[in-house]
Image (cartoon, coloured by chain):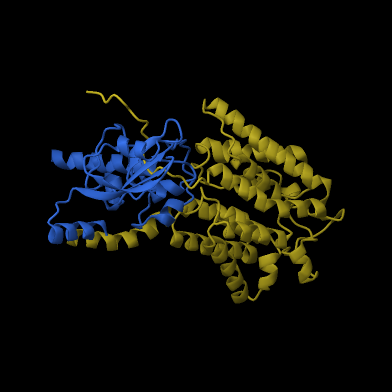
Chain colours: A blue, B yellow
Amino acid sequence: VATAKAVYDAVYLGKPFIERIITVTGDVKEPKNLMVRFGTPIKKLVEYCGGATVAGAEIIMGGPMMGIAQFDQNFPVTKGTNCILVKNPRVFAESDCINCGRCVDCCTMGLMPTLYPKLVKKSRYDECRAAYVDNCVECGACTFVCPAGIPIVQYIKVAKRELARRAVKK
Amino acid sequence: MMPANELPVAPGPHLWKGLSTRAIMLWVIVALLPAAVAGMIFFGIGALLTILTSVVFAVGTEWVCKKLRNRPFVMDYSAVVTGLLLAMCIPATMPLWMVAVGAIFAVGIVKEAFGGLGHNIFNPALGARAFMAASFGVEMTSWYFDGVTAATPLSKSVPWTGNMLSLLIGNHAGSLGETCTAALLLGGLFLIAMKIIDWRTPVAYILTVACMALVLGANPVLYIFGGGLMLGAFFMATDYVTSPVTHNGRLIFGIGCGIITMVIRKYGGLPEGICYSILVMNAVAPLIDRFVRSRPYGFRKVVKNAA
């Protein structure tokens, strides 16, 4: 929808793509939908919404599942930003995989996420590729449901990066 | 150049469902309680003592093993589940020191020796049951009910003459927690409704036993409700660690358990085959996963190459 609006603006109003609507939500005093110019620091947005209501909150660019926590408050809004989420960081208390299969049940790509952390811990990246780790879209559903609190997506990212690095070397 | 105002950064996803391993184990215990209470009602104070001994020694062994291996001891209640399951699949009249030995074997050898929760190949409670059946053969097959020796409904030498209602309620001879089918069914359906366990394993298991009983000319009701099938199908075959993770794998797992159970019951020397059938299928569970996962992925590979 935002893209369609931007196309309309550009074609009919001759207005370049310089702003978009961004949702600022989470632990802020007044969550808002704002029309924001690109380049606005995310700090300004959070301040405009009354500031964070919890101490030590992270500022996430994107949604709660795939969003990336920012390390710099002055980071600007870009054309890909759709949401700013202020939230306490999730603490991963990782315990052993109990093979419950919840990640397999919920995987949107029909993969077996249960394999990847085990393989990555042993640096068996080729077996990750054989198990189609490259098909993962990093939606985070497996990590959301994991009862053992394993950051499965992070292991998958490690595997993908390592495989990409090797591919470049060749 | 370091930014002046650094923020805390955690990897995504930034939400968690909040159902932890510990919570799952607690729900399993809750689901087992009705059958355990029924066991206490039918078999008296001995049942309570058996359960307490088993649980205490299971948790104690886990603690000792973690200390020996220099690992942190986390109370995730999995040892409680193991102890409870072990107590429920043995006779309530077992001498308590044998129960303790069984619980120590279950956690110390079957579970911790393989690396603890998540790494064991066999279900700890069933492994210990097999160990106890081999070590204390007489005590493990001495069934009492109302103070007198009695035969279990599946006994080969004494045909079952009681009515079907008592099979459901559980006022007949058998292991501590396996007799009250109604309570086990309640607990099992509760776990399925909570989505703690997958319905595929117990349904495949029980249906296979029923079909085999019909084909072999036996009474399916007696075979479903008379032995430890309810306990095994709902609480032991569904053990996460030792069963497949894929849906089809779980179906195959349940069917395999059912076939082996019925072969043992009809043609083997034992009246009951739940324990060994699940143990055998535990051993092949990783193979089942490997086998079933090759098919859906072959399809994806073609798509990937075309793109």
Q: Is residue B272 visible?
A: no
Q: Quadrant of the N terminus of chain B?
A: top left
Q: Position of residue B50 (x, y in %)?
A: 75, 43
Compared across the picture, whether B63 is left or right of A25 comes to: right
Q: Is residue A133 left or right of residue B234?
A: left
Residues B276 and B2: in front is: B2
Image quarter of residue B278: bottom right
- Asked which quadrant contains residue B103, the reply is top right
* Picture coordinates of residue A107, whole percent (x, y): 38, 55
User: Where does the image place residue B239, in percent across and percent down from the top left?
Assistant: 55, 51
Q: Which residue occupies the foreground of this view, B43 or A149?
A: A149
Between B183 and A77, the one lying in front of the other is A77
Seen at 29% across and 31% down, the residue is A72
Q: How many numbered dots are placed on residues in this image?
A: 0
The vertical placement of B89 against A76, above or below, is below
Is B264 above or below relative to B120? below
- The residue located at (52%, 50%) in the rendering is B240
**The C terminus of chain B, quarter of image:** bottom left
On the image, the x and y values in percent for residue B168 come to 74, 65
Considering every residue shown, the one lying at the far front of the view is A13
